[in-house]
Structure formats: structure tokens, C-alpha cells
Image (cartoon, rainbow, N blue to C red):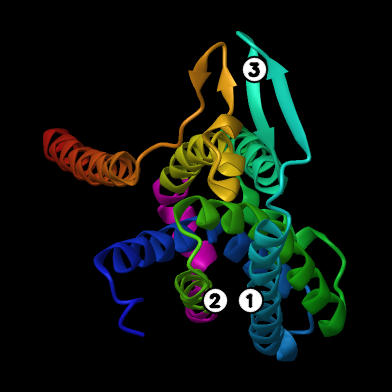
């Protein structure tokens, strides 16, 4: 237990909880909307059981992913094109490359979607009602789909399973507490979802960098380090990642405060 209570693990846990919470906003929005299609007397239990089952499956998925990364560490292909691309590829390399591209694509797609959709909250009430069981199954299925990017994001920050599990369980608890009011909150504070999407972009870059030395670290062989045009594909340092996240949060706080100040001054000027 004492080995887990290191500064690095606690810092990673703080970042993961924040990241899981921010990246879970779209999931919470879906849960809030979808649960309204169940019979009114079952809506609260639908949200509860949908989130509980989905979080348990998310932890199992995380554990499985970590085990696969460890079991399939041997490179199954080695690039040998000097001056163009060299290095080894194993399961971790594929996961990190696919995950980085997938996460960056998801972030760009969601940012574009946010710029084009104005009344997302009105979509849910126009669809047919469903049974409580159907809604729970939909919530669980969509939660697992949403969780794929958050699990890959978490693995880019740390591979310590207890830290990852605590972060996921904390995000599940947050979902249980916030599911009822998240739609209203997001409609009034959409800037936090934008913040999460830009953090997601950075995480995608981190994952792509982690792909470079994945096989080399697993086999303790520097010759397996991926090099593109002679340059090593290296991961972003944790210090740089934390600094980037802190800067984004501070920019959002300052910008929000400045916008409120401008709005207040305009109201005074209007009188």
C-alpha cells in the first residue's frame, strides 16, 4: 500500500480523476437523455444500474487490456527501412497508435459536432419510449463505447492498475451523483466539455509518442525503438503533459472570468 502512495501515483490519480470526469460529460449527457425514454417510475433505477454495470465492465476491460499488453510484448513485426522507418511493433505499439489516432479523431469529431449542433438536449424527447431493461442495455453498451477512449487515455498516463481502477470507480461515483443534473449543467457550462476535448487531443499525441519505444521497453532492446526518417518517436514527458493541462485549465478560468467581467460592464453601459 505504501508503494502506491507516492507523489507520482497521487499526481497521476488526480489527473486521471479530472480527465475521467471531463471526458465522461458526453457519457453523462447520453445517460441523462436516454433514461428519460424509460417509464418515469423507473428512470432513477435505470440510471443507477446502467452506470453500475457499465463501470464494473469498464474495470474488467481495463484489467484485460493491461494483461494483453504484458502477455503480447514480443514484437511481431520489425521495420527495417534505414532512413525511412526502423523499429519493432508489438501489441502495445498497435494499441497506442490506434488509440492515439482514434482519440484525436474523436476529439476533432466532437469539436466539429459541437459547432454544428445547437439543441442537443431536445433530441431525446422526440424518440419512442423504451422499456427500462432496453434503456439499461443501451446505457451499458454506449458507456463501453465511450469508455474506450478514456481507458486508452488513462493508459497513456500510467499503467498502475490500482490507480487506474480508483480513477474509473471515482468517475462512476461521480456519474451516479451527477447524472440527474448533468444535462442542465452542460447546457450552461459547455466550455468545460471543450476543455476536455482539447485535453483529449494532447492525450492522443501522448499515446502516439508512447508507441515509439513500446517494443524497445518491453524487450529491453534499444534497437527496437521506432525511428521515422532517422528521428526517434519518443513520448511526451509527464512534466510537459501536466504543464499543458494546467495551462489549458488556467486559460479557461481566466477567459471565463474575463467574459463575465465584459458582460457585467456591458450591462452597466446599457443602463
Residue at the (43%, 61%) spot, across then down: 16
Per the model, the C-alpha gap separating discs 2 and 3 is 42 Å
Residue at the (65%, 83%) spot, across then down: 52
Q: Secondary structure at mark 1?
A: helix
Do the numbered discs 2 and 3 sit on residues whose CB atoms are within 8 Å?
no
Quadrant (top left, top right, bottom left, bottom right) of the N terminus: bottom left
Q: Which residue position holds label 2?
A: 172
Tell which circle, 1 or 2, labels the residue nearer the N-terminal end: 1
Q: Is residue 78 left or right of residue 171?
A: right
- Taking 179 as reference, is 247 above or below it? above
In front: 221, or 59? 221
Q: Is residue 184 left or right of residue 2?
A: right
Q: Is residue 39 left or right of residue 267?
A: right
In front: 88, or 240? 88
Q: Which residue position holds label 1?
A: 55
Quadrant (top left, top right, bottom left, bottom right) of the C terminus: top left
Per the model, the C-alpha gap separating discs 1 and 3 is 40 Å
Q: Secondary structure at mark 3?
A: strand
Magenta highlight range: 173-193
Q: Which residue position holds label 3?
A: 85
Q: Main secondary structure of the magenta part?
A: helix
Is residue 228 one of those drawn in magenta?
Answer: no
Q: Is residue 79 left or right of residue 24?
A: right
Per the model, the C-alpha gap separating discs 1 and 2 is 6 Å
Residue projecting furthest to the top: 83
Amino acid at each position: 500500500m505504501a508503494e502506491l502512495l507516492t507523489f507520482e501515483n497521487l499526481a497521476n490519480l488526480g489527473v486521471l480523476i479530472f480527465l475521467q470526469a471531463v471526458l465522461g460529460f458526453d457519457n453523462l449527457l447520453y445517460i441523462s437523455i436516454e433514461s428519460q425514454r424509460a417509464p418515469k417510475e423507473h428512470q432513477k433505477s435505470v440510471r443507477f444500474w446502467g452506470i453500475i454495470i457499465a463501470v464494473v465492465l469498464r474495470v474488467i476491460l481495463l484489467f484485460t487490456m493491461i494483461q494483453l499488453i504484458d502477455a503480447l510484448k514480443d514484437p511481431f513485426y520489425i521495420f527495417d527501412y534505414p532512413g525511412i522507418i526502423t523499429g519493432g511493433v508489438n501489441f502495445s505499439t498497435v494499441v497506442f497508435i490506434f488509440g492515439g489516432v482514434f482519440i484525436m479523431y474523436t476529439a476533432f469529431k466532437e469539436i466539429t459536432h459541437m459547432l454544428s449542433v445547437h439543441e442537443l438536449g431536445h433530441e431525446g424527447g422526440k424518440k419512442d419510449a423504451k422499456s427500462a431493461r432496453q434503456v439499461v442495455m443501451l446505457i451499458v453498451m454506449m458507456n463501453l463505447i465511450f469508455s474506450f477512449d478514456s481507458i486508452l487515455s488513462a493508459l497513456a498516463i500510467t499503467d498502475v492498475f490500482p490507480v487506474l481502477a480508483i480513477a474509473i470507480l471515482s468517475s462512476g461515483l461521480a456519474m451516479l451523483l451527477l447524472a440527474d443534473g448533468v444535462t442542465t449543467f452542460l447546457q450552461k457550462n459547455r466550455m468545460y466539455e471543450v476543455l476536455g476535448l482539447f485535453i483529449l487531443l494532447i492525450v492522443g499525441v501522448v499515446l502516439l509518442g508512447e508507441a515509439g519505444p513500446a517494443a524497445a521497453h518491453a524487450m529491453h532492446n534499444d534497437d527496437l525503438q521506432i525511428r521515422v526518417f532517422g528521428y526517434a518517436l519518443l513520448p511526451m514527458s509527464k512534466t510537459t503533459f501536466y504543464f499543458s493541462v494546467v495551462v489549458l485549465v488556467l486559460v479557461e478560468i481566466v477567459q471565463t472570468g474575463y467574459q463575465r467581467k465584459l458582460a457585467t460592464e456591458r450591462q452597466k453601459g446599457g443602463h
